[in-house]
Image (tube, helix red, strand yellow):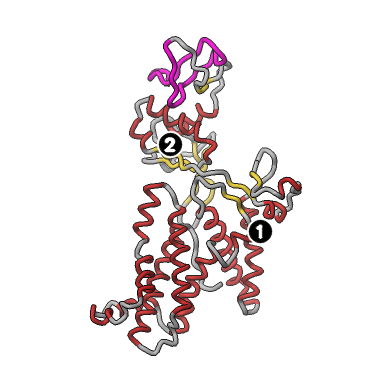
Amino acid sequence: MKQTGVLYFENEGKNKGCWVMTRPGAETTEGATDEDAKVIVRSNGTVTYVGKDIAYHLWKFGLLGKDFGYKPFFKYSDRECWISAEKGVEPHPQFGGAQAIYNVIDARQSDPQANVIQALRGMGHTAQADRYTHFSYEMVALTPRCAVELGYDVSEEDLARHYIEVSGRKGFGVKADDLIDKLIAATRAEVDARQTGGAEAEGRRQRIAEQIAIGALRYFMLKFTRNSVIAFDFKDALSFEGETGPYVQYAVVRARNIFRKAGATEEAVLAEFAKLTDAGLSTYLADEDIWALWLRAGRRTLVLEQCVATSEPAYLAKHAFQLAQEFNNFYHRHHILTEEDAGRKLFLLATAAVVMRELVVVLSWLGIESPEAM
């Protein structure tokens, strides 16, 4: 950084004795001291957080010329996980050398992130800087109701707020594992009330509860656009109504129930439906609401491209909810299993099959499983 002129030694002002870097967009007149310059090496010789982060990202892109030591950490059935270590073992897999970097860090870290990118550009690594993305998001908070449910003492003033900011330094927050455990426990009570069966069904009910709980958390975190504060709430996340993960999951379960009661599979229905001619399809073209549902189901790739172009996964979550919502309206409007017209029944079943297939794929992209029952 010194060789390329990214860093310079400050002889005057508050940063005297430090190695500093001009912030992005800063302008100084010749001979003037840049009081807003970013300190990379303090006057006592210690490196700041940003300085270490610059070195870390040089390693990530394979530009540092140095590497960590590594040792095995945990062995899964299909792969082995390694961890960095002061005294590593040889040989080890190759780490670093990324083609692109997405740093998922909240918006309050925008300035340090901008400094890392600026440093890369200043050192001549412009291609890497172009492939460095700060995937920023607003802060994650808790609703007062959720904070109380987690056992925190909440003041009257905070109870009146829309959300309470999580702060690790203040000891106010919740570990992800603890949150998931609480979500599973809350979901299990609902599953037990809905599902029958004795001890032999214990494992199945627990599995369903885990799928719903984790799906609820992931959907809740993804449904907000990145410039929105996320105020987490147990009741809102686990609701089977509204824009929630369980609501979308239940649409899949509803579709599966249709095929189970019909004694058919979605694959067989779609194979039979593919044999219909244009003349056979024209009979059902008057059902505009159904064709609107097909159109919605066919937007998956378009929505994904929109998510990638804007780095905004919330669009995919919204698509899943809207598709589930339109399917539920379709389900209540059309009596699929009791339809007497064989051709129309096939058309309705094919519609359910297409929607179910799309919902399963979209949910999987969001990291959410589709339970067999709920």
The amino acid marked with disc number 1 is Lys
Question: Which mark's residue is nearer the viewer, 2 or 1?
Answer: 1
The one nearer the camera, 284 or 245, is: 284
Magenta residue span: 1-30
Q: Is residue 106 left or right of residue 352?
A: right
Which numbered tag is attached to residue 60?
A: 2
* Quadrant showing the C terminus: bottom right
Q: Is residue 184 left or right of residue 12?
A: right
Res 96 → quadrant? top left
Give above or below for 254 relative to 173: below
* Quadrant showing the N terminus: top left
Q: Main secondary structure of the magenta part?
A: loop
Q: Is residue 255 left or right of residue 45?
A: left
Number of marks in picture: 2
Label 1 crowd (10 A; few <14 / some 14-19 / many >=20) = some
Residue 5 seen from this side: yes
Give above or below for 234 relative to 258: above
Q: Residue at x 46, y 29 (%)?
A: 115
Residue 46, image x, y percentages = 56, 21
Residue 162, image x, y percentages = 64, 49
Q: Residue at x 38, y 70 (%)?
A: 293
The one nearer the camera, 115 or 317, is: 317
Pick out the residue farthest to the bottom.
Answer: 340
The amino acid marked with disc number 2 is Lys
